[in-house]
Image (cartoon, grey):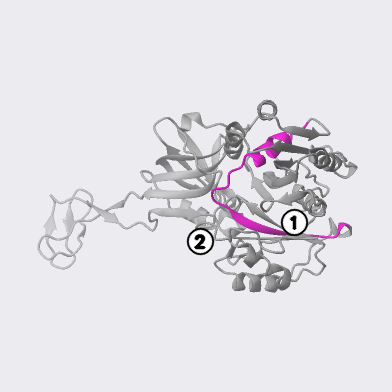
Amino acid sequence: MGKLLVNVGLDDFDSPEGGCTTYVASLLVERLDREPWAEFLDYPRLVRLNPNVPFKTRGNGAVSLALEIEEGRLDDLLGILAELVRSDEWLGHGKTDPVAVALVGEPPHPVRVLYRRALTTVVPLSLAERLARAAGALVLRAKRGRGLVGALAAVGASLTDYTFELLAYRRREMWGEPRCIDPESVVEFDRLTRGLTFGNVDYETGRVLVAPRGPDPVLFGVRGDDPRALLTALDVIRAGEPVDRWLIFRTNQGTDAHLRLIKPVRELRPYDSVGVRGVVVEGAEVGPGGHVRFVVSDGTGAITCMAYSETGHLNRAARLLRPGDEVEVWGGVRPPSRRYEMCINVERLRVLSARPAVHEVNPRCPACGRRMKSAGKGKGYKCPKCGLRARSLSRVSVAVPRLLEPGLYAASPRAYRHLTKPPTRARARGPPLMVTPWHEP
């Protein structure tokens, strides 16, 4: 019997009361793994999209699965997906709008372009619907279907750079309860897997970063370049409650996939994830709460940039910016409001050149070389060592070394977004084949 390649996309199962698209993906993996007619071709892909979209789900993440199924079993697969989408468990909250997509064959070029657009801007539902029809995608929805954008974008995602994430889930009776993750065990995991994992601990504050704070089903999640290193977490991290299930994803997290496009200031739109290259025209101004404001111009316009105190290292670097510095500023465009102008919330700062600081100082004595002192208003200068007086001399400009050096400045780990690329990682080093096991159950 022949085989069919089918790409499945899922999105918008999240809700403030505990729904989670990745958890639904783990249920789907468990179900399909029992079916002799279905075979996984890769890890499920956890695809993060534009983090600045205002109506996103938590983390704006969708999931896709690449499957090979027996011919004649497509209806069986669609029946399983329909059960997930129409389950009352995910439909009970008004903000949940789950969608599943099944696309037979390789995603066409327009669907891949949709993924790239969904990384950096706001994609209208109408565009996703047109592309789904043109591609022959089978769409299952229970409400309006806003999740189609993410589900189809996840199907079209081409992860040229990628990391892995192991997500461990809680038992249902624990959803919404406080998590009890032993910090020392997370530090030990970080030590054992250093260079292979990232984003486990913020050592500046001592904050553990592997556990979410909301009511979702995730107990903890660990990220890295090698899935074999992530499996260590199941033995090392002590959580105070048993792990109910776990699953390894291939993902675009930690790749800065959303920060690839430089735009002129005049073309910036609200909610863009974007970069601007220009010159600082208003230097750092530290406001309430320690947030730093500066203004960059690229000749087509000027844009306010905000480096918030929570970004740590980035905030401290932004404080050192001066007019004339050449920079690249990367982040999300916040729309204007009654109180605030449109601005870029800075996620990454690259200093291309730091203009030398110039201070004016008194001249040196032409006779002995000692720095002279003022002899009084309109009286010139007097040398405190040899007594020479000179009315013709004036103050001189001296270049002073800057504390800010050219280079890339990133936020502290506690301010990482899902897509933020840690400065320490290069590219994925994971094995080409899937590790065993890669999910349970």
State the quadrant of the C terminus: bottom right
Q: Is residue 228 visible?
A: yes
Magenta stretch holds residue 163 = yes
Name the foreground residue: 171 vs 227: 227
- Left or right, 100 with respect to 155, comes to right
Q: Give the residue at mark 2.
A: 424
Give residue 316's position: percent from left, percent from top.
49, 56
- Left or right, 352 with respect to 19, comes to left
Q: Earlier in the sequence, mark 2 or mark 1?
A: 1
As drawn, 225 above or below 42? below
Which residue sits furthest left? Answer: 367
As drawn, 426 above or below 52? below
Give residue 380's position: percent from left, percent from top.
17, 52
Amino acid type at image mark 1: Arg
> Is disc 2 placed on a helix, strand or loop?
loop
Magenta span of residues: 145-172
> Is disc 1 placed on a helix, strand or loop?
loop
Closer to viewer: mark 2 or mark 1: 2
- Left or right, 343 with respect to 403, comes to right
In the image, what residue occupies the spot 66% across and 42% down? 154
Q: Give the residue at mark 1.
A: 213
**Label 1 crowd (10 A; few <14 / some 14-19 / many >=20):** some
Amino acid type at image mark 2: Thr
**Label 2 crowd (10 A; few <14 / some 14-19 / many >=20):** few
